[in-house]
Image (cartoon, rainbow, N blue to C red):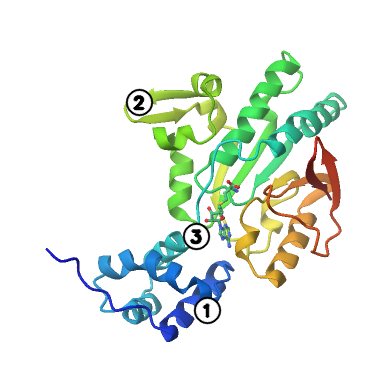
Amino acid sequence: MMPPKVPPLTPQEFELFRAFIEKACAISLDSGKMYLLETRLRSIVLETQSASYGDLYRRLKEQTSPLLRNKIIDAITTNETLWFRDQAPYTVLQEVFLPEMLAQVRKGRQRVRIWSAACSSGQEPYSVAIVIDEFCQRAGQGALMPAQFEIVATDISTQALAVARLGAYDEVAMKRGMNDSHRARYFKQNQRYWIVDPKLKRMIQFREFNLQNEFASLGQFDAILCRNVAIYFSQDFKVNLFEKLRRSLVPGGLFFLGSSETLLYINTSFKPRLHKNSTYYVA
Ligand SMILES: C[S@@+](CC[C@H](N)C(=O)[O-])C[C@H]1O[C@@H](n2cnc3c(N)ncnc32)[C@H](O)[C@@H]1O
């Protein structure tokens, strides 16, 4: 049987979706991304039996439930992620951040808060939780406890968050950065899936959150990871985003970008720091 035909995306239809996506999630698509948009939305055009991309847009505007809107956002966002991505931020957490937190806990601090601000399917916050758990074990009985940590993990994609909350990963996902010793210690196999240890889950609160929102409701953090997401945003939005992130950190709080990202050409009051050749930032 021939696959059903979808009329090609027209420049006018591209413009309608481009404007919708920028407003809905700040992702900035220039005209070079027409093919990307067309391929990512094609299955939704078919699934909704829309006659064209324009027809899909009309349905989107007429829908009162967020289902179609969420489906389109899920299709447009790039949820690519892996365990211990780039390693560098995890080394800084282990060698710089956690020793400082341990010293502060010894002086009476009660809680430590970390935000994974575009957590995708959860590999980033679970990797942070593993680093914390290992550090606490090394620090010795009662010195620092996983229960003192709160990791807030947010993303706009409902689909990616559903995987993160479930904490079940197939072999392909596990092969992307999870070593054998962590796999044996923090996962249990259940048929095709590897299920994350509930003790890591207890450290994390997953929440649907759009980085366009105001951040005050999330409170203040001691460290924030906002990695491999700002690359999709316009320059103006980035400037505003980094300023809001800085204000969400306590003075001296640490900030981490992806290894291919930099604040070099962005006017922020973050101070860059170098640890073993990798850059992180201090509020
Ligand atoms: C490429 S992933 C990065 C995941 C992880 N931080 C890492 O470095 O591996 C980018 C994530 O940003 C999320 N995202 C895109 N726009 C967003 C927005 N406006 N608000 C919140 N999350 C957003 C996507 O859903 C996606 O899961």
At horizontal 40% and vertical 32% (from top left) the residue drawn is 171
- 21 vs 245: above or below: below
At horizontal 45% and vertical 54% (from top left) the residue drawn is 158
- 200 vs 279: above or below: above
Furthest toward the bottom, the residue is 12
Furthest toward the left, the residue is 1
**In x, y percent, where is residue 238?**
70, 65
Residue kind at label 3, given as amino acid type: Thr
Query: Label for residue 19?
Result: 1
- 13 vs 111: above or below: below
Could you classify mark 3 by the number of other residues whose Cα lies within 10 Å: few (under 14), some (14-19), or many (20 or more)? some
Q: Which residue is mark 2?
A: 190
**In x, y percent, where is residue 114?**
69, 41
Q: Which residue is mark 3?
A: 77
Could you classify mark 2 by the number of other residues whose Cα lies within 10 Å: few (under 14), some (14-19), or many (20 or more)? few
Could you classify mark 1 by the number of other residues whose Cα lies within 10 Å: few (under 14), some (14-19), or many (20 or more)? some
Residue kind at label 2, given as amino acid type: Asn
- 136 vs 221: above or below: above
User: Where is residue 200, by image quadrant?
Assistant: top right
